[in-house]
Image (cartoon, rainbow, N blue to C red):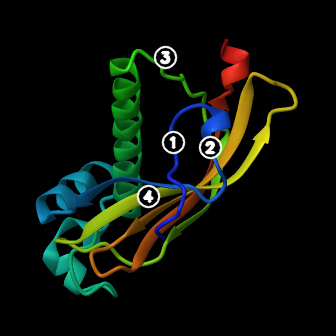
């Protein structure tokens, strides 16, 4: 891992396949899990410790959608930090485009109350858009790993990244 390239949330040309970036961590509390579940995923194992104990999870478990929402929140915050760092250096921060989608969403381990999930992104593929040459297309594996080092969550995302040459 010592010479592992670090992923940049910059321009397409600055990215390298295999580059990784930590985007942050989050500890799922019982209160957060229940609050999210009441609003968005009201299944018994997300709503109470008792409901969780009576399920195959054996305890209060976060909704997979909650785990994914936190990932998105941390990725957006990471992008905002990168933009602020670039602005402080007098550099123009790139405005990323939309995502045409994702695939291979996996909830690999339950996220229980008290678990801390650390999220990261790794560039898996890069290509220039044939129809929009001012954009590159980046494929990124986003993961969430619990405090025991177990992969709990992953998905393969695609996003449009601006090309530096096209922005000049």
Residue linked to disc 1? 8
Q: Earlier in the sequence, mark 3 or mark 4?
A: 3
**Which element is circle 4 on?**
strand
Which disc, if any, is residue 142?
A: none
Residue linked to disc 2? 15
Residue linked to disc 3? 92
Alpha carbon of mark 1 to alpha carbon of mark 2: how far? Answer: 6 Å
Alpha carbon of mark 4 to alpha carbon of mark 2: how far? Answer: 15 Å
Asked whether disc 4 touches disc 1, contact meaning CB atoms under 8 Å apart, the reply is no
Give the answer, above or below, for where 150 lies relative to 92: below
Residue sitting nearer the eye, 110 or 10? 10
Q: Earlier in the sequence, mark 1 or mark 2?
A: 1
**Which element is circle 3 on?**
loop
Asked whether disc 1 touches disc 2, contact meaning CB atoms under 8 Å apart, the reply is yes
Q: Earlier in the sequence, mark 1 or mark 3?
A: 1
Q: Earlier in the sequence, mark 2 or mark 3?
A: 2
Residue 36 at x, y percent in the picture: 25, 52
Give the answer, above or below, for where 101 lies relative to 113: above
Alpha carbon of mark 4 to alpha carbon of mark 1: how far? Answer: 12 Å
Neighbour class for label 3 at 10 Å: few (<14), some, many (≥20)? few
Neighbour class for label 2 at 10 Å: few (<14), some, many (≥20)? many
Kindly report which numbered mark, 4 or 1, lies closer to the viewer in this rendering. Answer: 1
Alpha carbon of mark 3 to alpha carbon of mark 4: how far? Answer: 24 Å
Neighbour class for label 1 at 10 Å: few (<14), some, many (≥20)? some
Residue drawn at (34%, 25%), measured in percent from left and top?
84
- Location of residue 136 (image quadrant): top right
């Amino acid at each position: 891992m010592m010479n592992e390239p670090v992923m940049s949330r910059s321009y397409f040309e600055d990215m390298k396949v295999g580059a990784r970036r930590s985007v942050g961590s989050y500890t799922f509390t019982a209160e957060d899990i229940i609050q999210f579940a009441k609003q968005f995923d009201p299944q018994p194992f997300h709503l109470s410790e008792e409901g969780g104990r009576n399920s195959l999870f054996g305890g209060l478990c976060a909704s997979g959608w909650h785990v994914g929402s936190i990932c998105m929140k941390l990725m957006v915050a990471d992008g905002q930090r990168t933009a602020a760092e670039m602005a402080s250096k007098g550099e123009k921060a790139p405005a990323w485009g939309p995502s045409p989608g994702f695939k291979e969403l996996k909830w690999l381990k339950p996220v229980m109350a008290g678990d801390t999930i650390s999220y990261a992104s790794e560039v898996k593929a890069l290509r220039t858009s044939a129809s929009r040459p001012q954009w590159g297309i980046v494929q990124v594996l986003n993961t969430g790993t619990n405090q025991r080092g177990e992969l709990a969550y992953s998905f393969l995302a695609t996003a449009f990244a601006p090309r530096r040459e096209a922005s000049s």
